[in-house]
């Protein structure tokens, strides 16, 4: 397989994987390109390489910046903004976990805490409270694991994996 084909296959696969993270395909493809680029890229270079519109690239670069997995860098004498992805896979996994926790787990925990205050003694209310309490307990455990993971170092995590 030639480099160009391998690069395209990786970008496409990473784009598909991105939907599992809760991000769109274009955002993940841009991230993939930045991950494998040896130099920071300008938005125009991303547009050209991935055949995407300026608006799509700019919107998704902002989103990647918000996720904390891409950074802006400057070049002396250049007016353009350049972008680079952190190449440390461990840091990427931690940052994605941290963001997913903030965007997904914390909001559902808040809702589950609120609905526990439902009033009534009917069978439906009791079943509702029991189910949402189970979901709340499970969510707390998931949140705790994600918090430990995002604050951990590689050695702790690898030791944990080895025990499993």
Image: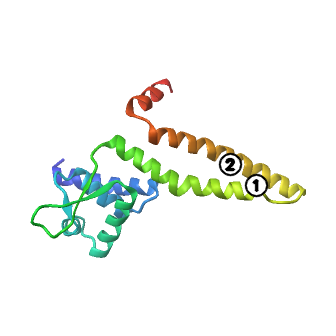
Q: Is residue 79 visible?
A: yes
x, y percentage for residue 89? 33, 43
Q: Is mark 2 on a helix, strand or loop?
A: helix
Q: Residue furthest left?
A: 77
- Residue 26 falls in which quadrant of the image? bottom left
Whether 149 is drawn above or below 135: the answer is: above
Asked whether, in this view, residue 125 is left or right of residue 39, the answer is right
Residue identified by numbered label 1: 116
Q: Do the residues labelled 2 and 1 touch (CB within 8 Å)?
A: yes
Kindly state the secondary structure of the residue where label 1 is placed.
loop
x and y percentages locating residue 149 in the rendered image? 47, 39
Residue 74 lies, with reference to residue 160, above or below; the image says below
Q: Earlier in the sequence, mark 2 or mark 1?
A: 1
Q: Tell which residue pokes out farthest to the front in this image.
A: 76
Residue at x-position 51% and y-position 42%: 147
Total marks shown come to 2
Please state if 53 lies on the left or on the right of 24 as rendered.
left
What residue is rendered at 90% in x and 56% in y? 121
The residue carrying mark 2 is: 136
Q: Position of residue 63 (x, y in %)?
A: 38, 64
Residue 130, horizontal then vertical, whole percent: 78, 49
Q: How crowded is mark 1: few (under 14 residues within 10 Å), some or many (20 or more)?
A: some
């Amino acid at each position: 397989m030639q480099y160009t084909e391998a690069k395209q296959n990786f970008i496409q696969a990473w784009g598909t994987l991105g939907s599992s993270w809760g991000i769109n395909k274009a955002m993940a493809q841009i991230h993939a390109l930045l991950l494998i680029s040896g130099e920071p890229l300008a938005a125009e270079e991303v547009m050209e390489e991935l055949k995407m519109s300026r608006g799509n690239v700019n919107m998704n670069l902002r989103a990647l910046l918000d996720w904390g997995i891409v950074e802006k860098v400057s070049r002396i004498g250049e007016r353009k903004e350049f972008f680079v992805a952190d190449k440390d896979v461990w840091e990427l996994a931690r940052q994605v976990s941290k963001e997913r926790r903030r965007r997904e787990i914390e909001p559902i925990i808040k809702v589950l805490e609120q609905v526990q205050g439902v009033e009534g003694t009917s069978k439906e209310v009791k079943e509702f409270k029991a189910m949402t309490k189970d979901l709340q307990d499970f969510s707390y455990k998931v949140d705790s694991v994600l918090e430990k993971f995002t604050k951990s170092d590689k050695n702790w995590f690898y030791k944990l994996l080895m025990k499993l």
